[in-house]
């Protein structure tokens, strides 16, 4: 292996990449509402970006075995179980050995005073890992292998009193270790004998010029920070978790996950905290999801109306209004933004990373950022309509932005676009996009008083009704007996279920019932899970079944009064939750494994809304 000096005490790596093979579902999520970490079942932090979701990674073994990790685990083989502490995103992993029980508690800690709506406001960029032992002695191994910049850099570590320093130009990390560690090239390791009743806390602290310097923390400080983080998450849950109904535990856990994917400073919500986990093993359908899609974030706010009390709604719409810029007459809303409102999300490839199970390329940035997707106006205004009670004090700028979105839907609905699935080919007249433009105007009419726009209701109504007539004339294919993917097509698309979910048509309309049956018959696999579509999309390779679409089918069945079938479909999808209640984007039809970025907001949104729809259908 050759190394070349780079930026101070770090070295650029030149090597042959090695793929990562740990199942996606074997990971658990940590969050401080600014960034996220993924931890494997056996106690390895294999993904961590600091200081925010979309920053370069410090650990990326998720995507390449040599791209960095931090593991703490017993040396002896153990039976492993794990859970989140009640109403929190604090992870507890229990290793049961023949003569001892070792407990590892992990958290990205929040600020000392963070509570309720303010969770994450003062997060110190500190990952804390607590070790406890009961029953007998246990030998534990610690391996700290930071590899900044997506594994491209091997830092030269140095010992400091009470820990290890990781230099990095203007950035700095400090590992707090209560035991001495042996330094080798770019690694720090230790083996320790853990005795019953003994508690040890490790921590990784990050800083840059905008933050207090990273330092070594005392054991007492770390214990207090961990306890305060448990309290902070429980205070958020107490204020927000209001859902009572079937699958209550799953819905509330999904609400926590959606909050964990929120970037507190701006209110942006990432689609997932990872990049390039593939939609098909070994394929190239690998995308960076660490951004806020207008569609995904709007649907998240809509789902939080069910799963929680969305007091942050006004802040979210204000963020979008600011990111979108002045709401002029020709507003054409960008489909996605960086988590601080950045517009340019140019995509690039990281060729030195092998990818999960050799699924190349690994991408950062997302080339869909400049696509045209006209459905976003409908998702945005539908969320605003659902959350109207929480938007009574919105400012004039946000009000003008929402009106401009309605106007844009009325202006652009006749145009082709790339659609909800972000097809990387020629634009089409996608049915779902037309339906969501209808929804944008329908919701704007209902919100006219709040938006101080009663004078525009007549114009919005005329445009809404024209869209409806066009969809009914051109979106329904009488030969195929279904609403189709796009005008002129005979192929079904699971997004057609949204005609019922948005209220465009009653779910028991004969055309809607036929579309539901077509999705079940033509897009459902042997596991009872639903593909987005089966038509060619211009990309090589296959993808898995889509969990959001499966929950949409359950939702539509419930709306049509077919609650027994709805429950069965819901259970098919929910059966794929991992042991701590997390879902990826897709499921492999061949193996049943999770595929795609993880955890995926879309999947948890679908779970919440489908559970709510079934609960409503069951009421007298």
Image (cartoon, grey):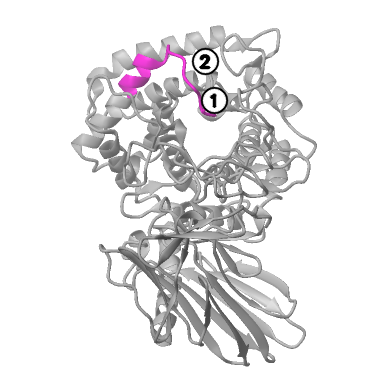
Percent position of residue 238, x then y: 44, 63
Does the magenta portion include 418?
yes
Percent position of residue 17, x then y: 61, 52
Q: CA distance from mark 2 to mark 1?
A: 9 Å
Tell me the crowding category of disc 1: few under 14, some 14 to 19, or many 20 or more residues within 10 angstroms, Cα based.
some
Does the magenta portion include 421?
yes
Q: Which residues are magenta?
A: 406-423
Percent position of residue 112, x then y: 33, 73
> Is 97 left or right of 220, judged from the image as shown?
right
Viewer-closest of 128 and 241: 128
174 vs 538: above or below: below
Mark 2 vs 1, N-terminal side: 1
Viewer-closest of 517 and 540: 540
Please give the name of the residue rendered at 50% of the width and 17% of the height, measured from the top-left corner. Answer: 427
Please give the name of the residue rendered at 62% of the width and 41% of the height, measured from the top-left corner. Answer: 614
Label at residue 8: none
356 vs 3: above or below: above
Viewer-closest of 619 and 184: 184
SS at mark 2 in the image: loop
Percent position of residue 407, x then y: 31, 20
> Is 315 left or right of 386, judged from the image as shown?
left
**Magenta part mainly helix, strand or loop?**
loop
Q: Quadrant of the C terminus?
A: top right
What residue is shown with label 2? 428
Residue 404 quadrant? top left
Residue 292 quadrant? top left
Q: Are marks 2 and 1 in contact (CB under 8 Å)?
A: yes
> Is 395 left or right of 388, judged from the image as shown?
left
SS at mark 1 in the image: loop
Please give the name of the residue rendered at 22% of the width and 30% of the height, measured from the top-left corner. Answer: 326
What residue is shown with label 1? 423
């Amino acid at each position: 292996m050759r190394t070349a000096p780079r930026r101070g005490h770090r070295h650029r790596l030149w090597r042959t990449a090695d793929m990562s093979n740990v199942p996606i579902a074997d990971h658990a999520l940590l969050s401080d509402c600014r960034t996220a970490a993924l931890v494997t079942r056996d106690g390895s932090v294999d993904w961590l970006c600091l200081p925010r979701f979309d920053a370069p990674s410090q650990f990326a073994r998720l995507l390449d075995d040599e791209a960095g990790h931090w593991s703490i685990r017993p040396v002896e083989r153990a039976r492993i179980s794990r859970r989140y502490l009640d109403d929190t995103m604090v992870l507890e992993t229990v290793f049961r050995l023949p003569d001892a029980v070792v407990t590892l508690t992990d958290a990205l800690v929040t600020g000392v005073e963070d509570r309720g709506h303010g969770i994450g406001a003062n997060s110190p960029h500190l990952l804390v890992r607590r070790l406890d032992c009961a029953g007998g002695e246990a030998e534990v191994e610690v391996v700290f292998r930071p590899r900044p910049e997506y594994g491209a850099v091997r830092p030269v570590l140095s010992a400091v009193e009470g820990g290890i320093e990781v230099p990095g130009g203007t950035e700095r990390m400090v590992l707090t270790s209560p035991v001495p560690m042996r330094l080798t090239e770019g690694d720090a390791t230790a083996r320790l004998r853990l005795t019953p009743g003994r508690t040890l806390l490790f921590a990784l602290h990050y800083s840059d010029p905008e933050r207090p310097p990273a330092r070594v923390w005392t054991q007492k400080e770390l214990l207090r920070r961990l306890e305060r983080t448990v309290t902070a998450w429980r205070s958020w849950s107490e204020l927000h978790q209001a859902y009572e109904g079937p699958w209550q535990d799953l819905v509330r856990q999904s609400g926590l996950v959606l909050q964990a994917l929120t970037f507190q400073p701006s209110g942006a919500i990432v689609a997932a905290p990872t990049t390039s986990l593939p939609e098909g093993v070994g394929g190239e359908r690998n995308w960076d999801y660490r951004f806020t899609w207008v569609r995904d974030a709007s649907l998240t706010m809509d789902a939080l109306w069910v799963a929680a009390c969305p007091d942050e709604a006004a802040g979210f719409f204000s963020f979008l209004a600011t990111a979108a810029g002045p709401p002029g007459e020709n507003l054409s809303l960008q489909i996605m933004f960086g988590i601080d409102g950045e517009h340019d999300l140019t995509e690039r490839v990281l060729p030195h990373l092998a990818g999960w199970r050799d699924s190349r390329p690994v991408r950062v940035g997302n080339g869909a950022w400049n696509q045209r997707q006209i459905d976003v106006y409908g998702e945005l205004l539908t969320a605003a309509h659902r959350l109207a009670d929480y938007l009574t004090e919105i400012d004039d700028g946000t009000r003008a932005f929402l009106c401009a979105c309605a106007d844009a839907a009325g202006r652009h609905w006749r145009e082709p676009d790339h659609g909800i699935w972000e097809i990387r080919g020629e634009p089409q007249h996608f049915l779902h996009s037309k339906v969501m433009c209808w929804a944008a105007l329908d919701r704007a009419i209902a919100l006219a008083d709040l938006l101080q726009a009663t004078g525009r209701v007549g114009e919005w109504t005329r445009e809404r009704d024209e869209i409806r007539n066009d969809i009914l004339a051109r979106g329904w294919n009488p030969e195929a007996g279904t609403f189709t993917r796009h005008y002129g097509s005979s192929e079904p698309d699971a997004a057609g279920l949204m005609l019922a979910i948005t209220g465009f048509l009653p779910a028991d309309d004969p055309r809607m019932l036929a579309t539901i049956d077509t999705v079940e018959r033509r897009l459902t696999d042997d596991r009872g899970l639903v593909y987005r579509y089966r038509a060619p999309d211009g990309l090589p390779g296959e993808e898995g079944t889509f969990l959001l679409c499966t929950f949409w089918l359950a939702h539509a069945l419930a709306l049509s009064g077919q609650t027994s079938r709805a429950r069965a479909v819901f259970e098919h999808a929910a059966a794929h939750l991992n042991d701590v209640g997390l879902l990826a984007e897709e499921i492999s039809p061949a193996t049943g494994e999770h595929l795609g970025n993880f955890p995926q907001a879309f999947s948890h949104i679908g779970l919440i809304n489908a559970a709510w729809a079934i609960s409503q259908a069951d009421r007298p």
